[in-house]
Structures are given as C-alpha cells and as structure tokens.
Amino acid sequence: MGAPGGPPRPQYPGRPPGPPGPYGYGRAPLGPPRKKGAGPGVWIAGIFGGLAVCLIVLVGLASAFTEDDPSDPYAGPTSSAGPTDGPSEEPTGGPSPSATPTQPTGRTAVTDSKLYDTGRLATVPCRAPSLSIRSTSSMRRFLNTSTDCLDEMWGQQFQKAGMTFEPPDRIYWSGPGRSPCGSFPAPGAAAFYCRASKGMYIGVRDVVKNSANAPYPVVYASVLSHEYGHHVQGEAGILDYGHEKMYYAGSIDEKNGYSRRIELQANCMAGVFMSSVRGTYPIGSDQRRIALLDAYYRGDRGPESTHDHGSRTNGRAWLNRGMTLGGPSACNTWSVSASKVD
C-alpha cells in the first residue's frame, strides 16, 4: 500500500516529517474459502476457479512456477492502544554486536548495503509447529515460533555485517486495536509493519480470512517473513531512504515505483528465510509451489495508480529469487531496471 498524499512538498531540501509507517503484504489472494475436508488440490483449484472468468489473467500462469531470475500509509504518534482482548507481545532477543557500528544512510543503504556482502542467511534449526487455522492459539504459537527463528537468523546476519540490530515487537492481534500507524484491522490489511513502533502487526484471524482460508503453514510463513523483511529494511536504513524518496516524488507513478522496490525486496527477503529453513521447517517442493502461487495472487491488480506492491509476475519472481539464492544480495531491488520492479 502506498503512502497517503500528505502535506505539500516544501520548496527547500529537508527530511520528510515522521518515520515510515505501515507496510502490508499485498492484497488478499482471490478465490473462495476452502471447503471443510477439501484437500490441497481443492484450495488451489478454488483460486483458479475464482479467476476463470478472466481469461487474460490465466495467460501468465504458464510461467508462474518457472525459476526466472529478475536481474505503507505512514506513521504518526509514538503511542498505541492495544487490541481489546490483548495482543501477543512476546519478549524478543537476539545477538547484538559488541561494538557500536554506524549504519549506512542515503542511497548507499539501499544499493550497497553491508547486508548484501554477508552471504547466505544463517542456517538455524527451525521446526514449524503444527498449525490449525481455526485456532487463534495455534496461529499465535506458529507465528511466535517462526518469529523466534527470524530474530536469530537476521540478528546473526546483521552481526556479520557489523550493523546494529534489535528484533521487532510482536503484536499478533485477535481484536481491534491501534498502532502508531493507525487502527487495525483495516480493509485488506491483515498484516503490516509499523516502523514508528518497530512492530509487526498480524491478525491471527484476519490473516486467515485474507489468505482465502489457505490451510498451508507456508502461506503464513511467507506473510510473516515478508513483514519481517520490512523490519530488516528499517534496521538497515532502507526504509528511511525509501520513505524520503516517496515523499519527494513528483508524481504518483514515481512514488509507487519506490514503493514497489521496497515491497518486492521484502518478498525476496521472505524467500531468503524460507530457503534457510527449508530442511527443518520444512519447506519442500510442494510448499514452495504453494508459496509462489500465493505470492502471484497477491500482486497488484486494478488501476495503475494503485500499483504499489509489484506485478503478480514480479511478486512471484522476487520471492523465487530469494528462495533460490538464499542470501540478502539476491534482494537488491534498488539496482535493477524498472521493468524488474513494475
């Protein structure tokens, strides 16, 4: 989702007001809710069936699983009220360097990030707990266990880069509430990252509904690791740069172009995580296929003015790139041509 129009741009150089705000993972994939007792094929077929009337959409599906290699409203105050029945805010931890290194800033932070030189993401044993999408406690357990792995993996990666890192706060809600970036739930936003609070916000019921009742854990691992990717961007200085460029953009098309580079990079970072845990989570060929299909259907659709997350093909391609190459260097969306991030 793109940023709101905001105040008129000043006529002098300066920093945009306020830190970056919520970044959400695409739209809900199309398709009817899965019927009780239906198997994997039924869920996937349901998505395709929901789109059968739009033949033009189906033309691109032949390449949906190929291994091609592609060379958000913003924050306000800093206090928040939690959801009515209480979020899950788990204590977080992770490695931190003993020194106090400086973080890259400006364009260097996005094109030449030290993270790009750290190799593949650290391999940490990470076994996903069983998941029942109808149980809020099961979903919370799944999200928290997976976030523990993300904290450790990305903490080690920042340490290798000589950069500071703090894990994000976790707000996994089951009732309405408010973040520094706005109220939740919001239409179409079952998961988002708010830089103002360094918090990941995921609705344990809403994320299921917004994912067409997908029964597969890999779908929710993809959503979670995408939002975590935004936290990685925030800690690395990438969101600051992207926020500034979007604020001073001269047109909605230019602003959306920067937004797509942010969102597609987070897609790739989700793929990097899934590559790292594929042996223990586990994520096999079937799970990978489902994750790529899910990413495809979360791609931009509708008017050009709303294209701020990336096309279906590119959304899938950047996730695939991260899953294939397995390291942050695969995710430099800031140094590729516009066609790779449209």
Image: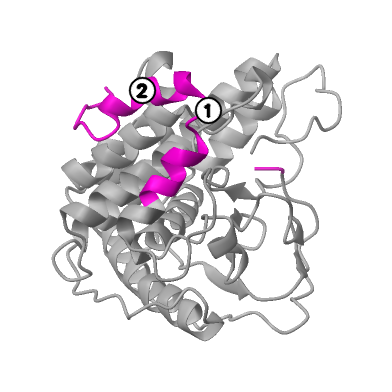
Query: Is 81 colored magenta in this rendering?
Result: no
Image side of residue 189 versus residue 137, left or right = right
Return the residue at label 2: 60
Name the residue tied to disc 1. 53
Q: How far apart are marks 2 and 1 (CA)?
A: 15 Å
- Residue 9, horizontal then vertical, whole percent: 80, 23
Q: Which residue is drawn at 46% across and 56% down?
A: 223
Q: Position of residue 138 (x, y in %)?
A: 46, 82
The local secondary structure at tag 2 comes to helix
**Mark 2 is on which residue type?**
Gly
* Residue nearest the observer in this picture, 274 or 329: 274
**Residue in the picture at 46% in, 66% down:** 166
Image position of 288 with respect to 17: above or below: below
N-terminal label among 2 and 1: 1
Q: Position of residue 69 (x, y in %)?
A: 22, 27
| Mark 2 residue crowding within 10 angstroms, few (<14) / some (14–19) / many (20+) | few
Looking at numbered disc 1 in the image, what kind of residue is underneath it?
Answer: Val
Q: Is residue 55 magenta?
A: yes
Q: Which region of the structure is painted magenta?
A: 44-73
Camera-side residue: 193 or 205?
205
